[in-house]
Image: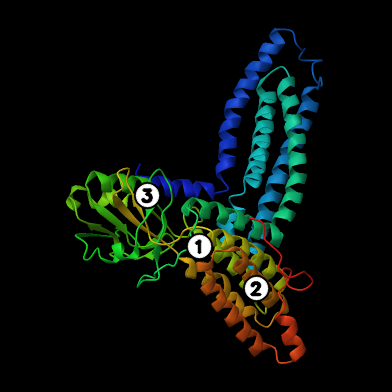
Amino acid sequence: MAWNRWYSLMSYLRSSLWVVPVIALMAQLVLKRLSEHLGGWMVRQGYYDLKTGFYGLSALEAHATLDRVFTLSLSCLVFTFGSLLVAIQVAGGQYTPRIIATTLLRDNVIRNIVGLFVFTGLWSNRTMLQLGYEADVPQFQIFIAILLGLAALIAFIILIDYSAKLLRPVRLVGRVGEHGIKVIREIYPNPTQNVTVTALPTHKHWSLPSWGSRVTAATPATAVKRGTPDRVISHQGRSAIVLAVNLKRLVSEAQRIDTIIEFVPQVGDFVSVEEPLFYMYGGNTGAIADRELRALVAFGSERTIEQDPIFSFRIEVDIALKALSPAINDPTTAVLAIDQLHRLLRQVGGRSLHGQEIRDSEGQPRVVFRTPNWDDYVHITFREIRYCGANSFQIVRRLRAMIENLLEFLPEHRHPALHEELKLLDRAITREHVFPEDLALARIPDSQGIGGSSGATVDN
C-alpha cells in the first residue's frame, strides 16, 4: 500500500468510533473459545464442580442472570451512543465542529468503554446459547459474565462522569492546546536565535521537522534564486486538503536522483486538480515517476493536527469567536481559549520558523517545505478575536496581558509584530469605549480578563 493511502487510512481509523467495538467483537470470539476450554480443563482437574462450583446456579437461574447482564450491556451501549450524538451536536454548535474529529471521536476512554459494552453483551449472549445445547451449566462462563457485567456497570458510571468533564470548555480547549504544543515541538525542533530576519517576497517562510534528516539554516536569498523549475508535478485525482507529507522519503528520493524538490503547498492547504504540487530543480529530474512523488503526500477532506501546527490555533480561535457571538455571548469561555493561544504562541515564538531547508547527510539541500511564519501565527491569534471582542472588558484585558507577557519572555526579533497588535488593540479600545472610566479599565492587563493580577506568566 502506498504511503499516502496508509496514512489516510490510519488517520481515518484514529477518528472512527467503530474500530474498538469491532476489535472487541473479534477478541470475544477468541477469548470465549479459550475460556470454554479452560473451564472444561478446570472441571476435569477437579478445581470446581459444575453443580456447586462458583455460584452453583441452575439452568434457569443462569439464564436469568445472563439475560440481565446482556440487557445491562445493551442499555449502556444504547445510552452511550445516544448521549454521544447529543454531545457531538452540542460541542459542534457551541464550540466548533472541528473539535469533533480532532477530540471527541479520538478519545480512547470513550472508545474503550464502548468496546467493553460490546464485549460484555456478546459474551453473555454466547453463554446463553450454550445453555440451550449443553446439558451442564457453564459455571465458569457465567462467573466471567457476572464480572464483565459489574465492570460494565462501573465503566458506565465512570463514563458519565468523564463525559461531563470532557465537555467542559476548559477541558476541550486544554486538549487542543496539548495537541498543538506536541505538533509545534515536532515541526519546529530548533530554538530560535535573536537575529534580524529578512522577509521573503512571499508570506510563507520555510521550516522543517527533524524526522531523521539533518536540518540547517538556508538564507532566504538561496530560495529566491532557484529560478524556473526544471520539472513541475501537478496534483491529480480530486481536489482535497493536504494532511501530511512523508519528508523522510522525499529527502531520500531527492538524494537518490541528485535534485532539489520543493513542496509547493503547505500542510492544511486546499489543492485543486492540476495545481502544482512539486517543483524540481537540477539533477536527473526525470528519474522518478509522478505517481511515486504523489504517493508521498496524504490528502483528505478535513484538516488534522498531526503535521499542521497552525490548525490548533485555528480551532482555539474558532472556539473563542463562537463564544463571542451574540447568540452565545460567553466571553469567559473565550478567555479560556485565549489562555491556550497564549501557551501555543509562546511555544512558537521560542522556535526557529524561518529560512530552513532539509539537507541530506552530506549537507546538500534536498527538500523545501513551507510552514507558517511568525506573522501568520500572530495574526491568527489576535486579529479576529480583537475584532469580535473589542467591546468586552475581559477580552481586551486578557489580550493585553498576553501581549505584555510575550514581550517580556520572547526574543527581541519577535517584538515588532506584537507591538503592532498592541497598537491595534489600543485603537480598538478607544473606538469601542467612550467613557474615560471604561477606557481606563479596558487598558489594564489582566490574565483573568477581570479579577486577576496583571503580568502573570504562563507555564509551558
In the rendering, at what x and y percent does residue 218 appear?
Answer: 35, 58
- Point out the tag, 2 or 3, that comes first from the N-terminus: 3
- Point out the tag, 3 or 1, that comes first from the N-terminus: 3
Amino acid type, residue under disc 2 in the picture: Leu
Residue behind mark 2: 399
In the rendering, at what x and y percent does residue 109 appear?
Answer: 66, 45
Amino acid type, residue under disc 3 in the picture: Leu
Q: Residue at x 57, y 26 (%)?
A: 30
- Callout 1: helix, strand or loop? helix
Q: Residue at x 79, y 16 (%)?
A: 53
- Point out the tag, 1 or 2, that comes first from the N-terminus: 1
In the rendering, at what x and y percent does residue 440 appear?
Answer: 74, 85
Above or below residue 137? Residue 267 is: below
Q: Count residues near mark 1 (Cα–Cα under 10 Å), then give few for <14, some for 14-19, many for 20+.
A: many
Give the mark toward the camera: 2 or 3. Answer: 2
Residue behind mark 3: 247
Q: Is residue 10 left or right of residue 335?
A: left
Amino acid type, residue under disc 1 in the picture: Ile
Q: Residue at x 34, y 64 (%)?
A: 220
Q: Quadrant of the N terminus?
A: top left
In the rendering, at what x and y percent does residue 245 appear?
Answer: 39, 52
Please report contact status of discs 3 and 1: CB closer than 8 Å, yes or no. Answer: no
Front residue of this view, candidates 190 and 187: 190
Q: Is residue 376 left or right of residue 435?
A: left
Q: Residue at x 37, y 49 (%)?
A: 247
Residue 411, picture quadrant: bottom right
- Callout 2: helix, strand or loop? helix
